[in-house]
Amino acid sequence: MISIYSNALAIPSQRRGAIPPSRSNIMKGRKKIPTKLKEAQGTIEKSRLVENEMQVDACHELPASPDWLSEIGKSEWYKVTNQLFNLQMLHQIDLPLIAAYCNEISLYIETETMLREKGRIQLFKNTDGTLKHAQAVPYQKIAKDALDKALKLAVQFGLTPVARASINAPKITNNTQINYFD
């Protein structure tokens, strides 16, 4: 005898309209590491090379900072691009992400400066002057979110201590380490 509820009790992959296990949201393994990074780390193996890996254009000269960045953002731009250029790791396609990182860092520094000047707690009082309640000012969240976004971008470029520890930087001679902004 077949129950009218038999389809409801079936294994999920056997139900009508269910996504087969081969196409469901199963973990796909480790993130792929670019070949250049494998070479820098010294972990390159021919059996794990990606055929036809996308190659991007390297910057042959230091790019100017975007006009829309604040002064703090432009200062960070020059630090980051100069460092990546000297390490021969600055690519044209990465420039918008570097600009986003610089913007987030400048937003964090600007909001932290403002919070130090104006305070981090907002006090609300009753009409008679007694304290009704206190709360953190909204700029606290803006600063926290900006720092979180900046850190996520910084890891992509090896700008954090942990990210740098996993990268074996290319050999630098006196000819390649030049600060073009001094």
Image: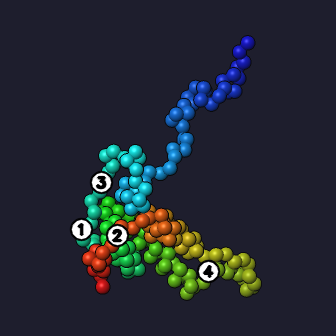
Tell me the quarter of the picture where residue 141 sits: bottom right
Q: Nearer the viewer, mark 2 or mark 4?
A: 2
Q: Nearer the viewer, mark 2 or mark 1?
A: 2
Assess whether mark 4 and mark 2 are in contact (beta carbons under 8 angstroms).
Answer: no
Instruction: Using residue 11 as the reference point, say whether residue 116 is left or right of it.
Output: left
Q: CA distance from mark 1 to mark 3?
A: 15 Å
Instruction: Name the mark nearer the viewer: 4 or 3.
Output: 3
Instruction: Provide the secondary structure element on which disc 4 rests.
Output: loop
How far apart marks 2 and 1 lie (CA) works out to: 18 Å
User: Which residue is drawn at the image coordinates 48% and 79% (left, top)?
Assistant: 110
Q: Local crowd at mark 1 within 10 Å, few (<14), some, or many (≥20)? A: few
Disc assigned to residue 60: 1
Q: Horizontal and vertical percent for residue 95? A: 33, 65
Single out the residue that lies furthest toward the top: 1
In the picture of the structure, the residue carrying the numbered disc 4 is: 120
Q: Secondary structure at mark 3?
A: loop
Which residue is more in the foreground, 66 or 125? 66
Q: Which residue is mark 2?
A: 171
The quadrant of the picture occupied by the C terminus is bottom left
Dot 2 falls on a residue whose secondary structure is loop
Q: Residues within 10 Å of mark 3 (few under 14, many from 20)?
A: few
The spot of residue 151 in percent (x, y) is: 50, 68
Please tell me in which quadrant of the rendered image residue 85 appears. Answer: bottom left
| Disc 1, SS | loop
Earlier-in-chain disc, 2 versus 1: 1
Tell me if 26 is positioned left or right of 39 in this view. right
The answer, for residue 37, to whether it is visible in the render is no
Q: Nearer the viewer, mark 3 or mark 2?
A: 2
- Nearer the N terminus, badge 2 or badge 4? 4
User: Between disc 4 and disc 3, whose residue precedes?
Assistant: 3
Q: Which residue is mark 3?
A: 55
Of mark 3 and mark 2, the one earlier in the sequence is 3
